[in-house]
């Protein structure tokens, strides 16, 4: 279970940051772009982005994005309100292209650089893009769908000096001839409107284009300041820019502070600390399992020589929290809650950023309710829908009881929904909660309050499965497994077995180098730490665990493969309770389980 502490100091800081954001709005700095422009005016020569051997100041980015804006206007006749898909890897021009489009009032849709053919086409179509901007190393992927794009009248540009095809326009040769001066007439943005689109992967189906409003973007910029970063910090960003963690929280936070960021093409565990030393990095941004990769990497001298004082992000699991701070030396960890994909959907969650630091008590003080209203609703454990009374209203949970975290929608806490997908948007909302006509955003997280007013993270909907009438938290089991010395990482999920209600526990694990699975030790550890219903009945040994591009564990495929021997090549083990050991899952044991001769 992950729990966080929300100290009163942080509460004060949060109040201050919200206050500052509001004050900024009064001073006329109202959008993400406005905030950047102000920094470019006040500290033009301050380094903004360091990328490989390049350093761009705030002014450099300002001028180059003006050049892009002018090229898009004159060569592409793009204007306010046009939706433009951007398909690029991390590089400074990602930001210059993006800001150039913002300056024209276009809405940018960031595409995940890992998608291909059908999904790529789906994303471009679902957000209604008029044009597509492609980084040169991704052009190959786009070429496969070029005929479809031509049919849809999508203008395709490659961010390069030349283009291999007539169907694709080159951009950089045009940009060189453009003026870098401030654009004469820049369309005014409506603060309540949409800023950009970010695709959320979700667990199943095709990704959805979530609208990210201006309010939400500006609120995201407050995350790093809220964590205690300052304008003197050097911020290390290795996350993909198409994801909001990097673009809105990371780059946005850097802009808000007027700080410098070191941008990497992609995350690399072996370069991480070396880069931190080389660039005097003081703040690193993480997400999900990124920290675990660092822990799994062999020791390098730089990991103790750096000046990193703060790690800010979300999704760090509690089983590695201590190890992380112990090994890498006195780094303060600031974990924000709800800053991953669902946060791309709504402004509400950012203000809720349960920024906390971990202490022994590891709790989250809910005094932030002052800034961010929320409710915990009683839910049906089968459907994860709120339970309704006879009169159709939802029920608040009691102290100690887990509930679905929902937040009321207001003018300031917007939910702009997904592009072209009313049904999916509606699914994120709960209506008529306490009175007729009220609307709440469903975070999909289960939390509970204790009687002292502390709020705890219980689970993410979908991260629990039921077995023998009990709820099993996959996160909790994974953390228990992760604490064994021979297990490098574990991903826990529930699989269906014929003849049984619910799902039985299974864990995909990666063993540490030179280690073997010690079934007896594993069994003894489980007996000591978890109730019997939570023990994984099956273990699948993998050489590496699949993660999503945002470093979250991939479960869907594992669940689908279950214990199907015709689909799985990895060695499988079965918990034989009579032997108090995990035994190799042979075909005959498998058959025995499937026909019910061996009971679980
Ligand atoms: C939570 O924080 C508030 C204000 O910061 C403080 O007054 C209160 O005592 C805290 N609650 C607990 C249970 O520590
Ligand atoms: C890092 O800091 C050291 C000592 O303050 C300084 O000598 C060095 O030039 C800095 N390096 C960079 C890349 O800023
Ligand atoms: C499982 O979780 C649900 C929701 O919190 C709860 O209502 C139910 O009682 C739990 N079941 C058990 C056996 O704890
Ligand atoms: C497994 O772990 C136990 C301690 O729990 C130890 O006594 C035993 O030797 C280990 N077995 C192997 C094969 O390492
Ligand atoms: C196992 O996978 C194969 C191939 O996809 C499928 O035909 C079979 O029905 C699966 N078996 C079970 C028990 O799900």
Image (spheres, grey):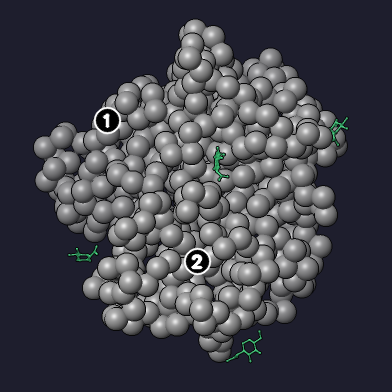
Q: Mark 2 = which residue?
A: 536
Could you tell me which quadrant the C terminus lies in? bottom left
Q: Residues within 10 Å of mark 1 (few under 14, many from 20)?
A: some
Q: Residue 78, relative to residue 530: is it above or below?
A: above
Q: Residues within 10 Å of mark 2 (few under 14, many from 20)?
A: many
Q: Is residue 408 left or right of residue 156?
A: right
Q: Residue 322, relative to residue 378: is it above or below?
A: below
The answer to whether any part of residue 86 appears in the image is: no
Q: Is residue 363 left or right of residue 120?
A: right
Q: Mark 1 = which residue?
A: 128
What residue is shown at x 39% (from left), y 77% (from top)? Answer: 572
Q: Name the quarter showing ligand 5.
A: bottom left
Q: Is residue 381 left or right of residue 43?
A: left
Q: Position of residue 422 (x, y in %)?
A: 32, 23
The answer to whether any part of residue 515 appears in the image is: yes
Q: Describe the element under mark 1 as helix, strand or loop.
A: loop
Q: Earlier in the sequence, mark 1 or mark 2?
A: 1
Q: Position of residue 257 (x, y in %)?
A: 70, 39
Locate residue 324: give its quadrant: bottom right
Q: Position of residue 35 (x, y in %)?
A: 62, 30
Q: Nearer the viewer, residue 288 or 398?
A: 398
Locate residue 327: give its quadrant: bottom right
């Amino acid at each position: 279970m992950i729990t966080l502490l929300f100290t009163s100091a942080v509460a004060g800081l949060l109040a201050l940051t919200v206050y500052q954001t509001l004050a900024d709005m009064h001073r006329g700095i109202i959008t993400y772009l406005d905030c950047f422009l102000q920094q470019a005016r006040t500290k033009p020569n301050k380094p903004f982005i360091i990328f490989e051997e390049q350093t761009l100041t705030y002014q450099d980015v300002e001028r180059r994005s003006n050049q892009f804006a002018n090229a898009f206007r004159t060569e592409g006749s793009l204007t306010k309100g046009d939706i433009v898909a951007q398909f690029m890897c991390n590089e400074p021009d990602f930001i210059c292209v993006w800001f150039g489009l913002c300056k024209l009032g276009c809405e940018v849709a960031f595409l995940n650089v890992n998608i291909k053919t059908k999904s790529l086409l789906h994303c471009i179509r679902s957000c209604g893009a008029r044009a597509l901007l492609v980084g040169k190393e991704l052009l190959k992927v786009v070429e496969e769908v070029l005929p479809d794009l031509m049919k849809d009248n999508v203008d395709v540009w490659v961010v390069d000096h030349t283009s291999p095809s007539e169907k694709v326009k080159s951009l950089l040769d045009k940009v060189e001839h453009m003026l870098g001066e401030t654009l004469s007439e820049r369309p005014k943005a409506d603060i309540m409107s949409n800023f950009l689109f970010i695709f959320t992967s979700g667990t199943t189906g095709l990704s959805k284009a979530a609208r990210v409003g201006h309010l939400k973007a500006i609120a995201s910029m407050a995350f790093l300041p809220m964590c205690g970063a300052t304008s003197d910090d050097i911020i290390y960003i290795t996350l993909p820019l198409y994801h909001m963690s990097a673009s809105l929280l990371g780059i946005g936070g850097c802009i808000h502070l007027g700080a410098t960021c070191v941008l990497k093409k992609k995350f690399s565990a072996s370069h991480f600390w070396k880069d931190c030393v080389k660039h005097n990095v003081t703040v690193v941004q993480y997400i999900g399992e990124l920290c675990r990769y660092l822990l799994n990497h062999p020791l390098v001298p730089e990991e103790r020589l750096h000046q990193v004082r703060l790690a800010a992000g979300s999704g760090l699991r509690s089983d590695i929290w201590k190890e992380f701070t112990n090994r890498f030396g006195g780094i303060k960890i600031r974990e924000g809650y709800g800053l991953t994909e669902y946060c791309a959907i709504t402004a509400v969650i950012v203000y809720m950023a349960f920024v906390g630091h971990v202490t022994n008590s590891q709790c989250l003080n809910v005094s932030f309710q002052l800034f961010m209203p929320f409710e915990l609703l009683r839910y049906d454990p089968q459907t994860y829908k709120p339970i309704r009374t006879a009169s159709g209203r939802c029920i608040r949970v009691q102290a100690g009881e887990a509930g679905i975290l929902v937040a009321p929608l207001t003018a300031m806490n917007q939910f702009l929904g997904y592009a072209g997908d009313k049904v999916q948007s509606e699914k994120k909302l709960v209506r008529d909660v306490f009175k007729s006509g009220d609307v709440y955003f469903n975070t999909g997280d289960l939390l509970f309050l204790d009687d002292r007013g502390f709020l705890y993270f219980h689970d993410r909907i979908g991260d629990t499965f039921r077995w023998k009438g009990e709820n099993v938290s996959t996160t909790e089991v994974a953390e228990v497994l992760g604490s064994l010395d021979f297990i490098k990482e574990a991903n826990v999920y529930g699989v269906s077995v014929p003849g049984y209600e619910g799902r039985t526990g299974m864990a995909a694990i990666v063993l540490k180098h030179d280690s073997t699975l010690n079934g007896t030790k594993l069994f003894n550890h489980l007996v000591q730490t978890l109730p019997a219903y939570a023990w994984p009945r099956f273990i699948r040994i993998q050489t590496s665990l699949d993660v999503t591009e945002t470093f979250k564990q991939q479960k869907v495929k594992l669940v689908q493969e279950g214990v199907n021997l015709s689909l799985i090549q990895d060695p499988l083990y079965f918990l034989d309770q009579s032997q108090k050991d995990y035994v190799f899952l042979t075909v005959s044991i498998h058959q025995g389980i499937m026909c019910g001769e061996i009971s679980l």
